[in-house]
Amino acid sequence: MKFESRYSAKLLFQFRVEVNGSSGVRRLCEERILTFSAENARQALREAKRRGRAAKYRFPNSDGNPVYFEFVGVLELIRLLDGDSDEVWYEIVERVRPMERRSTLIPPEKRLSAIRHAE
């Protein structure tokens, strides 16, 4: 039996709208975090890419222009710590005085997506 570790991948997608043959340069993007098991990091990367490619789709917008939801790539792939089943993502970043600047770094609770969409 092979041991599998838990991994999380941050995937980048774009919505590309084609109007009169042009897609423009500014695109609405989605960053999506997936969590899954894999035997090793290379297998986890293959799985993340497979899931990203499988998520693409196309639909017409209200003006009849084609909208493409496209997988751009894997932004980050991490192996999650063993034993913490609640953990789905972490990033280690350096910031200047985060506690002192928390009012500008942390959004008001009403702007959090789950809260905003629940109202």
Image (spheres, rainbow, N blue to C red):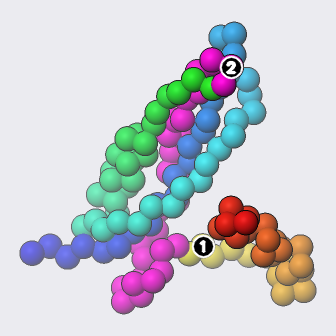
Residue 46 location (% of width, % of height) = 33, 51
Dot 2 corresponds to which residue?
63
Say which amino acid is labelled 1: Glu
Vertical arrangement, residue 9 with respect to residue 14, above or below: below
**In the rendered structure, which segment of residues is drawn in magenta?**
62-89
The answer to whether residue 113 is visible is no
Query: Which residue is depicted at the point 53% across and 27% down?
Result: 59
Q: Quadrant of residue 22?
A: top right
How dense is the environment of label 1, judged by Cα within 10 Å: few (below 14), some, or many (20 and up)? Answer: few
Say which amino acid is labelled 2: Asp
Residue 110 location (% of width, % of height) = 79, 71
Q: Are marks 2 and 1 in contact (CB under 8 Å)?
A: no
Q: Nearer the viewer, residue 83 or 110?
A: 110
Left or right, 98 with reference to 23: right
Q: Nearer the viewer, residue 56 or 114?
A: 114
How dense is the environment of label 2, judged by Cα within 10 Å: few (below 14), some, or many (20 and up)? Answer: few
Q: Which sits earlier in the primary sequence, circle 2 or circle 1?
A: 2
Residue 45 location (% of width, % of height) = 37, 55
Vertical arrangement, residue 117 with respect to residue 99, above or below: above
Q: Is residue 64 magenta?
A: yes
Cα separation between marks 2 and 1 = 40 Å
Quadrant for the N terminus, please: bottom left
Q: How many marks?
A: 2
Query: Which residue is depicted at the point 29% across and 57% down?
Result: 43
Work out which residue is located at the far left of the displayed protein and give it: 1
Query: Which residue is depicted at the point 60% across and 39% down?
Result: 14
Residue 68 location (% of width, % of height) = 55, 29
Query: Which residue is depicted at the point 52% across and 52% down?
Result: 11
Dot 1 corresponds to which residue?
91
Work out which residue is located at the far front of the displayed protein and give it: 119
SS at mark 2 in the image: loop
